[in-house]
Amino acid sequence: MPVLLSFVPDAWGPTVRIEGGAVALTRAGPNGIRFTAPAHLVLVMVLPQPCRAAAPNGTQPTTIQAPAGSLELMPADAACFARWIAPKECLLLAFDQDGLAQRAALEGGRGDFEFHPPKLGTIDERARVIAGLIRDEMLQGPRRNEAYLTALLTALKIHLLREHPALVGQGRAPSRGGLPPNTWRRVVEHIQANLSANLSIPRLAEMLGVSPSHFLRAFRQSCGQSPHRYVLEKRLLLVEHLARTTDMPLAQVAEAAGFSSPSHMTAALRRWKGVTPGQLRREARRQDPGGQGDARSGGLP
């Protein structure tokens, strides 16, 4: 079973790991469950759940009438509890933290976000429609198309980020309890030395021997922004430096800075500074037509 949804009993239904997350179509009689959310989770009711007792975010349990199509959002690391007295069917989705942060950055320009859970029992019609399509594909069994499931998961992700966001305040002062100074220095040096490599949250957390959720929380507390945002800014600083001071082809600049393509690099820099790498290079050449000093050496200052 996919690690993201390993707390879901196998007997409750099929669970599939796909790019960007995991999906479980769960069917169970009267029962209950208590767990800590291993990632950002989304629950969409396929069948109504009368007298559902739920505490999705570590709150006191509340008994509600949960109609079909009602939505529950559970942030990563939240303590969750639910109990139901009638047979239930629902779709449970888990989002990879790193991919969700990247999508949030594309949608809102920032990766330091939190979901704003709606009131229990709230119906989200668009989420219900997308979840229905995911459910239909899950029921295809071995014939299901994972590319289609991935596309549907991305569509739901975008919808939730647009309709239920709660971006962390910009400029927030770092709080206590972050990474120890030596650990912070180790992480920063590793990021700077490996900007072309995979610097996902799970990889960085594994390097330190901690869980991704703990690393994400501690990193934010240490510098006031998400790892994704921090890495992105360091990569863009490298792009700016290489574009201004070297003749390196822009495709190689993108590769050196860890971008998947020159177009990805260009779009990110345009969002960040309102310019493209080509514009930076042309501006630098106008200012220094002879390319003297270290302007073509490629060495970082």
Image: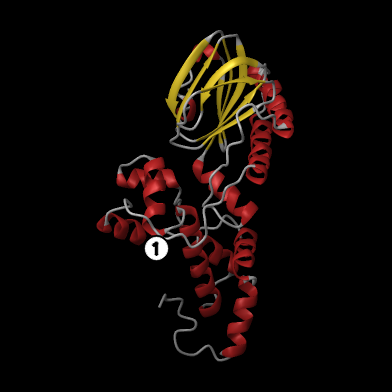
Q: Secondary structure at mark 1?
A: helix
Q: Position of residue 286 (x, y in %)?
A: 62, 88
The residue under label 1 is 192
Total count of labels: 1
Q: Is residue 123 left or right of residue 272?
A: right
Relative to 299, residue 223 above or below = above
Q: Residues within 10 Å of mark 1 (few under 14, many from 20)?
A: some
Relative to 158, residue 92 above or below = above
Dividing the picture into quarters, in which one does residue 149 lie?
top right
Display coloring: secondary structure
Dividing the picture into quarters, in which one does residue 132 lie?
top right
Dividing the picture into quarters, in which one does residue 28 lie?
top right
Q: Is residue 145 left or right of residue 52?
A: right
Q: Position of residue 27 (x, y in %)?
A: 59, 13
Q: Position of residue 117 (x, y in %)?
A: 58, 37
Q: Please state which of residues 29 and 252 is positioned toward the viewer in this rendering.
A: 29
Q: Please state which of residues 53 and 217 is positioned toward the viewer in this rendering.
A: 53
Q: Position of residue 198 (x, y in %)?
A: 46, 51
On the question of residue 130 being in view, the answer is yes
Relative to 132, residue 11 above or below = above
Direction left: furthest residue: 182
Relative to 85, residue 165 above or below = below
Q: Please state which of residues 80 and 244 is positioned toward the viewer in this rendering.
A: 80
Residue pictured at 71% horizontal, 31% vertical:
130
On the question of residue 9 being in view, the answer is no
Amino acid, disc 1: Gln
Q: Is residue 227 left or right of residue 189?
A: right
Residue pictured at 43% horizontal, 58% vertical:
224
